[in-house]
Image (cartoon, rainbow, N blue to C red):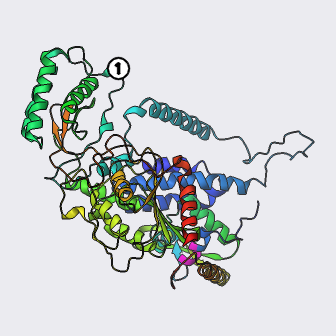
């Protein structure tokens, strides 16, 4: 099976890593968190979400922790995912890369203002 | 039922994906269905799923492709095609049946959409077309605007046939409405007399087609008054008893649709050379979209020039026209609008505190689809020499007035206000707004960018 690519890091994978920074989440929790942190612009469908999760699992950027119930959503058991230290490191370096890009954009006056 | 449909759709994924995540994907679908109730949420959910399926299924098969199954993988010979099998074993009968049913369904939908294309009103049109083009949509007592192109009687087989009694009934009703409502009473009387005289002399006798009869009466009235804002129209579909789109549900639906479409601000960005670009596909109601409009103008505040792309803009609310135009002046400016009496609402609220766009070059991109309120914006800024119009002559929709329903098929648009046009004797009614730089609509953005760059270089 061909290697699922993470270089460059797709925005979906980056958003999933960011969603897991604060807490372990199940698939639907990740989808909701990504929608929140992008103001609703990115609503991950099941296919895209689990394909990206599979990629991140293979790259050991996230782990599958356990299956348990989410009291708010009912008695069904759900698989939870957790970001690994390699995942945090990659998320940080991606954020720094984007910050560098913004600095260049400001220098070129493509982007105005001091804040994003 | 919807969960069962999604379970079927999951069968389209390769088996390795279904086995690993099929259950979770269904669980996620159930969660969304439970949390996203209401028509628009449900519609959005299914649109999301369709896009998701279209993107993720080919990708998953791509991942599966390098491990072909089968007894042996043949060596590729020169120019001899090689076939790989993605799944081991034959497809299950259920999968074959599902594939056949899906194909038939897709074919049937395609055929149905083709055969009903003429009557189809898309969701986007309901949300943005009808509501936006009723430029006084939210003012219950104010005049409604209407559109000349609303008449759709095209199929001769289905056209309403008129006899002498029907014709006389329409003429009598038109006479009563003219005398009662037309702004200039003397002209109203003359037009009414003309309609009756033509009927008496048999000029209308040969006309049995509803649309042709409406056009004939409109011509007879305009021969007397030369008022191109006055019209008598025929619609094949029955006209509603009451003006549409004024209930709280309609307003809520409109508000929701606008939020989902970012108030039709399709793009707001800075192009190379610090040229601001806003693609606006309607002029939505300020009561819903004022924050979005202000945010869009604020985002472009530091641009050195600004381009308004109205090539897909079919109209909307004059209040939004005024709101956006306000940013282009450093003093209150009169904006002519044939729909309204000259009042304080005809003046922009310039200057806007902190606004830097008042002295920046402005360009408006137009097409033959640019219509109604978009023409109001274009016409006034052209006449005020505040913007350069680039593109095609616009659609020519300045008709406005109070709509008077005669019966299920006929109605009249009567101007009941008289706005002062300080720029010219005529406006854009039926002739459109001529651009300053006439180019194909598709080329307008490139040309406008070049014009802006050249102007900025000269500064």
Classify residue B183 as left or right of residue B29: left
Say which residue appears at 38% left-offset and 68% top-offset: B328
Q: Looking at the picture, how far across and down is residue B150, in whole percent?
A: 31, 37
Residue B82, x across and y down, in percent: 84, 42
Label 1: few (<14), some (14–19) or many (≥20) C-alpha neighbours in 10 Å: few
Residue A95 is one of the magenta-drawn residues: no
The answer, for residue B287, to whether it is visible in the render is yes
**For this view, does A48 lie left or right of residue B342?**
right
Vertical comparison of B123 with B457: above or below: above
B245 or B327: nearer the viewer: B327
Residue in the picture at 46% in, 47% down:
B367
Q: Quadrant of the C terminus of chain B?
A: bottom right
Picture quadrant where residue B343 is located = bottom left
The subunit letter for the residue under badge 1 reads B
Q: Give the camera-side residue of B398 and B152.
A: B398
Q: Which residue is mark 1?
A: B156
> Residue A15: image x %, image y %?
56, 73
Q: What predominant SS class does the magenta segment belong to?
A: helix
Q: Is residue B409 above or below residue B418?
A: above
Give the residue at x 35% y 65%: B324
Number of numbered discs on residues = 1
**SS for tag 1?**
helix
Figure check: B314 above or below B404: below
In depth, the one of B369 and B89 nearer the eye is: B369
Residue sitting at 31 percent across and 75 percent down?
B351
Magenta segment range? A15-19
| Residue B254 in the image: above or below residue A69 | above
Image quadrant in which you'd find residue B446:
bottom right
């Amino acid at each position: 099976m061909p290697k699922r690519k993470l270089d460059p890091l797709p925005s979906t994978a980056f958003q999933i890593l960011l969603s897991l920074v604060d807490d372990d989440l199940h698939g639907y929790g990740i989808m909701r968190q990504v929608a929140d942190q992008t103001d609703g612009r990115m609503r991950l469908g099941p296919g895209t979400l689990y394909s990206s999760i599979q990629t991140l699992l293979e790259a050991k950027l996230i782990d599958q922790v356990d299956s348990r119930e989410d009291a708010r959503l009912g008695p069904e058991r759900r698989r939870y995912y957790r970001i690994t230290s390699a995942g945090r490191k990659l998320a940080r370096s991606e954020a720094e890369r984007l910050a560098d890009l913004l600095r260049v954009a400001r220098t070129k006056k493509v982007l105005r203002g001091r804040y994003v | 039922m919807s969960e069962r449909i999604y379970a079927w759709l999951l069968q389209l994924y390769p088996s390795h994906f279904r086995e690993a995540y099929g259950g979770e994907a269904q669980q996620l679908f159930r969660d969304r269905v439970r949390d996203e109730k209401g028509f628009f949420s449900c519609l959005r959910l299914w649109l999301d799923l369709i896009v998701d399926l279209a993107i993720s299924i080919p990708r998953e098969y791509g991942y599966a492709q390098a491990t072909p199954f089968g007894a042996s993988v043949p060596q590729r010979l020169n120019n001899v095609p090689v076939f790989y099998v993605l799944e081991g074993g034959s497809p299950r009968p259920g999968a074959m049946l599902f594939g056949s049913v899906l194909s038939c369904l897709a074919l049937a939908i395609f055929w149905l959409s083709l055969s009903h294309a003429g009557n189809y009103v898309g969701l986007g049109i309901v949300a943005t077309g009808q509501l936006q083009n009723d430029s006084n949509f939210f003012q219950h007592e104010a005049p409604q605007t209407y559109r000349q192109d609303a008449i759709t009687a095209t199929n001769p087989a289905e056209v309403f046939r008129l006899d002498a009694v029907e014709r006389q009934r329409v003429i009598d009703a038109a006479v009563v409405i003219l005398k009662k409502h037309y702004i200039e009473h003397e002209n109203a009387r003359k037009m009414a007399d003309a309609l009756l005289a033509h009927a008496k002399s048999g000029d209308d006798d040969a006309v049995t087609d509803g649309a042709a009869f409406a056009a004939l009466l409109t011509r007879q009235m305009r021969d007397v008054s030369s008022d191109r804002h006055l019209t008598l129209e025929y619609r094949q579909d029955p006209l509603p008893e009451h003006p549409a789109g004024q209930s709280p549900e309609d307003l809520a639906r409109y508000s929701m649709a606008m939020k989902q479409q970012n108030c039709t601000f399709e793009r707001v960005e800075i192009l190379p050379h610090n040229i601001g670009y806003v693609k606006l596909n309607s002029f939505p109601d300020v009561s819903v979209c004022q924050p979005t409009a202000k945010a869009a103008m604020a985002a472009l505040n530091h641009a050195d020039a600004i381009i308004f792309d109205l090539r897909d803009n079919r109209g909307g609310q004059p209040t939004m026209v005024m709101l956006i135009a306000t940013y282009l002046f450093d003093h209150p400016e009169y904006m002519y609008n044939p729909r309204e009496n000259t009042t304080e609402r005809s003046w922009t609220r310039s200057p806007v505190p902190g606004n830097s766009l008042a002295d920046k070059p402005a360009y408006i991109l137009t097409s033959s689809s640019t219509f109604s309120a978009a023409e109001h914006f274009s016409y006034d800024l052209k006449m005020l020499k505040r913007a350069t119009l680039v593109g095609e002559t616009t659609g020519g929709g300045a008709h406005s007035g109070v709509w008077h329903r005669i019966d299920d098929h006929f109605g009249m648009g009567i101007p009941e206000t008289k706005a002062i046009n300080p720029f010219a004797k005529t406006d854009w009614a039926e002739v459109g707004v001529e651009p300053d730089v006439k180019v194909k609509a598709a080329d307008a953005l490139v040309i406008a960018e070049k014009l802006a760059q050249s102007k900025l270089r000269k500064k």
